[in-house]
Image (spheres, rainbow, N blue to C red):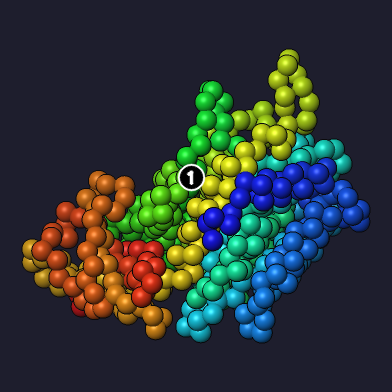
Amino acid sequence: MLADISAESVKGYVDRLAAFGTRHSLSDTESDTRGIGAARRWIRDEFERFSRESGRSGDLALRVYMDRHHIQPDGRRIDVPAEIVNPVCVIPGAMPEARDRLYYVIGHYDSRNSDEMDRVGDAPGANDDASGTAVVIELARVLSKQRLDATVVCMATAAEEQGLIGATLHATDARDAGKDIRAVLSNDIVGDPSSPFGGRHDSRIRVFSEGVPRNLPENGLRRIQGLSAENDSDSRQLARFIGEVGAWHDLPVRAMLMYRPDRFLRGGDHTAFNRVGYPAVRFTVVEEVYERQHQDVRVENGVQYGDLPEFVDGEYLAGVAKLNAAAMMHLANAPSAPGDARIITARLMPETILRWQASPEPDTAGYEIVWRDTASPVWTGSIDVGNVTEYTLKMSKDNHFFGVRAYDSDGYRSPVAFPAAARR
Ligand SMILES: [Zn+2]
């Protein structure tokens, strides 16, 4: 699958999207050549092409649709009634016990220039965010050829630049419908590895994740304080997981873990999912070149401004797509992370007892316990404990953080479940 992901393919999507002139969320929707309407119909047509080429049918057929929302002026970046449309391609999982688990890859296909309200002028939005949209389209293409246990949802979002609107409307509907979204990978500005200081970052992509969740249940902060779990949210476990996947497969572009939700002065669609309680992370290049972002296309004092396709590197972007695709293969084929993971703290003892619930997928083959020193940012040790739901380690529970993950008979590992403390 990874060999099927190519620079030509992803760069081709970026060039095509930039050629719609502008994809501003309030731009023309009637034209077949310019504006956000033409862009979203092209994305949908690509998804439908993959559907035909996939050979899938019945329950496993791709489901391609437009997630439409009518909104009114909001006094901020929407000044007329508008239709916000997210093209979606659902790749259904094949395992009955896993198919309700949803894994999202998203990128916003809308664009902007210097004036966030300019719906007419050119806004090629090549890096921001045709690049992320290209990752979404490429994953739909290659993952639709795979048999997956759980369901993958590839979605291009609209109106990110107008206030995360398309993602927020989708995430809120999903929450209200009780959808079981286990992970969201948001790709936003993932195609230009150059540094504003000179040089390049060809082998790294930043992966931002929240530490303390934005959406905390009642007593959530007290629970985090009791467990010292401020660095162990589900989003952060997802980020570490993406880091490990890159290393397992020796991928050309690997995660640079960012222990903060996002950059200063900027936001992104992953936050829309975090706000309603779903684990979500953001992929973004290592350093951003602001002359090429949210800028009118122009030359000033010999400097080229504007978010042009020539600044997107197809090889690097393909590497980012490979990291996303490999993470999705693991997430959608591995068992669920073990439920109700807990450290037994009934009495003082030098050993550490961990218990958890068996993952429900029938191909679950066993479990690994992972650990790290309390000052370590990533898991540093692991032990395969076999197909059990309790294990005692000769290690101090005070001196380490522990986690549990499940693996299946093919060796696909789940993200880590971070244990609570319990008396039994
Ligand atoms: Zn963006």
x and y percentages locating residue 176 in the rendered image: 60, 73
Q: Is residue 389 left or right of residue 178?
A: left
For the C terminus, which image quadrant? bottom left
x and y percentages locating residue 167 in the rendered image: 65, 59
x and y percentages locating residue 247 in the rendered image: 38, 51
* Outermost top residue: 301
Badge 1 is on which residue?
Answer: 253
Q: Is residue 113 left or right of residue 149?
A: right
For the N terminus, which image quadrant? bottom right
Classify 179 as above or below 221: below
* Outermost right residue: 31
Residue drawn at (75%, 68%) of the image: 48
User: Which quarter of the figure has residue 419?
Assistant: bottom left
Residue drawn at (75%, 19%) of the image: 300
Q: Is residue 200 left or right of residue 217?
A: right
* Outermost front residue: 3
Classify 411 as above or below 208: below
Asked whether 3 or 214 is in front, the reply is 3
Total labels: the figure holds 1
